[in-house]
Amino acid sequence: MSSLSATVQEVLNEPGCAKNANKTQEQRKKGCIKQLQPGGVAGGCAFDGAKIALQPFTDVAHLVHGPIACEGNSWDNRGSASSGSNLWRTGFTTDMSETDIVFGGEKRLYKAIKQIVEKYCPEAVFVYQTCVPAMIGDDINAVCKAAARRFGRPVIPINSPGFVGSKNLGTKLAGEALLEHVIGTQEPACTTPYDINLIGEYNLSGELWQVKPLFDELGIRILSTISGDGKYRDIASSHRARAAMMVCSKAMINVARKMEQRYGIPFFEGSFYGIQDSSNSLRKIARLLVEQGAPDDLIERTDAVVAREEERAWAAIEPYRFRFRGKKVLLITGGVKSWSVVAALQEAGLEVVGTSVKKSTKEDKERIKELMGHDTHMIEDMPPREMYKMLKNAKADIMLSGGKSQFVALKAAMPWLDINQERCHAYMGYVGMVKLIEEIDKALFNPIWQQLRRPAPWDDVADDQQGKAGAKVGTQTTGFTADPIVAARIRRAKKICLCKAVDLGTIEDTIRSHGLTSLDAVRHQTSASSGCGDCKSRIEDILAAMLVSSPSALLQVAE
Amino acid sequence: MAIVLAPRKACTVNPLKMSQPIGGAFAFLGLRGAMPLLHGPQGCTSFGLTLFVRHFREAVPLQTTAMSEVATVLGGYENLEQAILNIDNRTKPEIIGICSTGVTETKGDDVEGFIKLIRAKHPQLAKLPLVYVSTPDFQHALQDGWERTVARIIEVLVPAPEAGSERDPARVNVLPGCHLTPGDLDEIRTILEDFGLKPSFLPDVAGSLDGHIPDAFTATTIGGIGVGEIASMGQASWTIAIGEQMRSAAEAMRTKTGVPFRLFERLCGLIPNDQFISFLSNISAQPVPTKYRRQRAQLADAMLDSHFHIGGRRLAIGAEPDLLFDLSSMLHEMGARVTAAVTTTQSPLLERVNAEEVLIGDLEDLEELAKAHACDLMISHSHGWQSAARLNIPFHRAGFPMFDRVGAAHQLSVGYRGTRDLIFDLANLVIADREENHRPTPDSWRSPKPALGSGTRRWMDAKERSFA
């Protein structure tokens, strides 16, 4: 058994990883651990990554060995779906106290495993190591071994304490644990030439079930998924699959590559996000299976299913083309999704004005260029402040991103849709893509946006009554404004155009000095109303009021 | 009087408890322009952040010193220094609040010492308040982290008033416990202002986490009590502490500034609010406004209308000590029986909970107790939903986190009005449950089978015996 640091070194030097392959020897030695910047990061830890990767195994008890923070603050926070056991979403932790830290936590861990086995009778127990017991030297491998022997069922150590690195590294370490302790330890009840593994698919919101009916129709059997709706027995016997698909995420590439190496299971990297991608993936699976000895007709049957599904999906998306014309999307996500949903969005008539490539590989970027042309706005790293500005200035009509950046969009009163792990809708396969388009439509055309972009009545200059009342309130609360100059300053500072941040004073001055009479002219001079256009009527009101009252207008009339 | 039982299990199942640093960070989030910083590995912050974001559905500032394995072994000075400098450069905070975690406490980092060194080395930080609280994950719970942090903020940021300086009779300090929502704080604020009082809330999560849309993007908290206002809290004439957890903070305030305090253990229910309102009337020398006379009458009526439904209910409640005491007392006063009570940490209040036992435990304990006592109403934070679903009993979400419903920040339980609404909500929950699950059937009142069944079995037994 190799030490944790050796395993970390090994997974970081993953030959299957394209990014790693492009590195120099020197860079490779450093591994892909980004030097974390204290005070400037917000990512999950290695324990988080391991837990995310394995938690969807439904009939396993996931026991976290550590103080309350690791499990107490985080349990049951993922929306994977299970078709059977709900044991996976029960939180188990040793909740280490100060005494455990002084005297060591191994005994408590052993007792905890005993308690779980006796009460919940799980297929297996996964024991997650965390920072504090790793620091004090709790040997979870030894405890797991002893417990497995004593209780006659698999007790698997997952050695991925938070402080060894990032979430991504943790996912890889979880994969290593599966390779070392689980995969290949049991035999399936039967095998077929149509058996596949799906690696890195978590069945979020049950999205796997959007694709599974197609597999069922084609007679393709999902022997195991790592780990969405997974069962311990399935993964233990997953080494008998004929082919594997690495779904969407490169994080588990070590599992796919080593299973190819050890058991001769060829794999490819594919995605079910987007119509084209779903078709490509289905075809690739069919081809791989046929290459591995499945009957030839699978390819033809797959082509027929793909053609039918594509036609259905495009027909369902077609009606949106007209509604979406001219609407601009900002796509902030990672990896494959940075391009895999682009085609469908474009097909629905949306213009993708930017896509983030922070976690994307070189190939991902090539695909983006292919789809969106060379002048595509590829965003390496966009701080929230920039995102907010972009949305506020109406350079995009909707943002699709993960939950962490949602408030940037929402607080700018801009439509937003969750396309990462916390989402509550499933967007996989053909039906999923149609669902995504439907959701975008709902978000874009919701009547709330127009209401929210209106100024509050007390900020609305067009409403004279309110203006007067507002000035009064100002006087009362601030207590210093019987002063007409201050009152005027407050009046002039009122924002008329929220998108371009143009205030009343600027607009009035420009109208006066240039003798403007039309909205277009005001827009040209001040750039007000060139964003969302909601302030159009307010500017027209100002124009109307000034035509009557402004001295220059009077002068003109007099002349 | 309840017997308080300590945990007995090796394995905590379905945790009710959350860790101290989260409570500490939570308190710092009630300060304006604040950046809470957890001194530990990045995961500690990431999990906490997710908790807050899922509960409040707001962007939440929270940073980490990103301790790696190596940094942990070598000590966290450099990480802390870098984190403070980075935060100061990027977000220009008005205050950085630092909480330790399990890792850095196990290692034994001397953070106060580090801060002194950092200040000496970087004079540009001279005016930036840095408040450090020790909050190891392996001790206590969220509520304790909040409690320690508020007390610490007072010790560090409230100066002793100058000799001979006058108190402002209208100014009142309010030290709310972490079980109060932004909506609760706003309700209390309105009540105090209606008596002509000028309250300063420490912390004031209503300013930062109430969901208001700020005019411009800020990387720190978007509101809350400012450092300047905290420094002037010594000028107040009274301190009102809400929840037993705030006693140490109120005492710290009195020690530091001489401001007397009055502690209200709860603000949910008729009698506690009578006491609260008369206290306010006394200290402000104002008569009770008509509004509250009417609200009291409305609460009385709500109690009349709802006691049919709540009376006799067997309540299972899992919550941090102050919230447990608050809600279970109110329901007890409505005629419910508290038959299962589980909490997270020690508190002098626990033995005064109106139940036979209070267990420091987890949601598995709560579920088992609820099952054993045939409870028919469950209250806990959102994680309790699985237990309530398995038991098929009505479930009310209270406390932190509430991630599967919207509006957590505005759930109200204080004041006459808040109590009235909560009582209605709970009664409606019970009514809905009766309609859905307990409609009468022709067999509802038939004598139970066992008598007949056991007779049959005896006959069968005889027959079997005769065969044998």
Image (cartoon, rainbow, N blue to C red):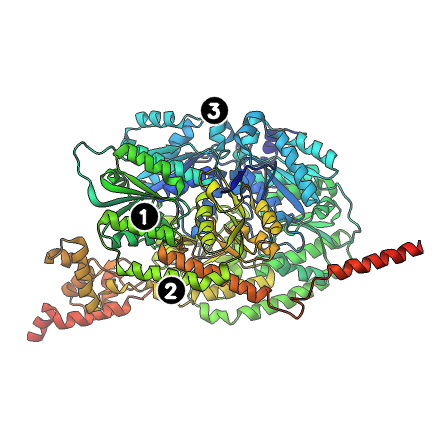
* Element carrying mark 3: helix
Query: Residue lying furthest left in this view?
Result: A559
Q: Give the alpha-carbon distance from disc 3 to disc 2, as whole Å.
A: 52 Å
A79 left or right of B38? right
Distance from the alpha carbon under mark 3 to that under mark 1? 37 Å
Location of residue A428 in the rendering, given as x and y in whole percent from the top left corner: 58, 58
Q: Amino acid at mark 2?
A: Trp
In the displayed structure, does residue A298 sit left or right of residue B198? Answer: right
Labels 3 and 1 touching (C-beta < 8 A): no
- Name the disc covering residue B223, or none: 1
Circle 1 chain: B
Q: Nearer the viewer, mark 3 or mark 1?
A: 1
In the rendered image, the vertical position of residue A284 relative to residue A311, given as above or below: above
Q: CA distance from mark 1 to mark 2?
A: 25 Å
How packed is label 1: few (under 14 Cα within 10 Å), some, or many (20 or more)?
A: many
Say which chain tag 2 marks. Answer: A
- Residue closer to the observer: A259 or B44: B44
Label 3 sits on residue: B74
Q: Amino acid at mark 3?
A: Leu
In the rendered image, residue A3, in percent from the top left (x then y), is placed at 63, 28
Callout in the foreground (1, 2): 1
Q: Which mark is residue B42?
A: none
Compared to A96, does A441 lie above or below? below
- Circle 3 packing at 10 Å, graded few (<14), some (14-19), many (20+), is few
Question: Can you identify the residue that label 2 sits on?
Answer: A449
Tell me where residue B23 appears, x and y as whole percent. 43, 41
Answer yes or no: are tags 1 and 2 on the same subunit: no
- Circle 1 sits in a helix, a strand or a loop, which is it? loop
Tell me which numbered mark, 3 or 1, is placed earlier along the sequence. 3
Q: Amino acid at mark 1?
A: Gly
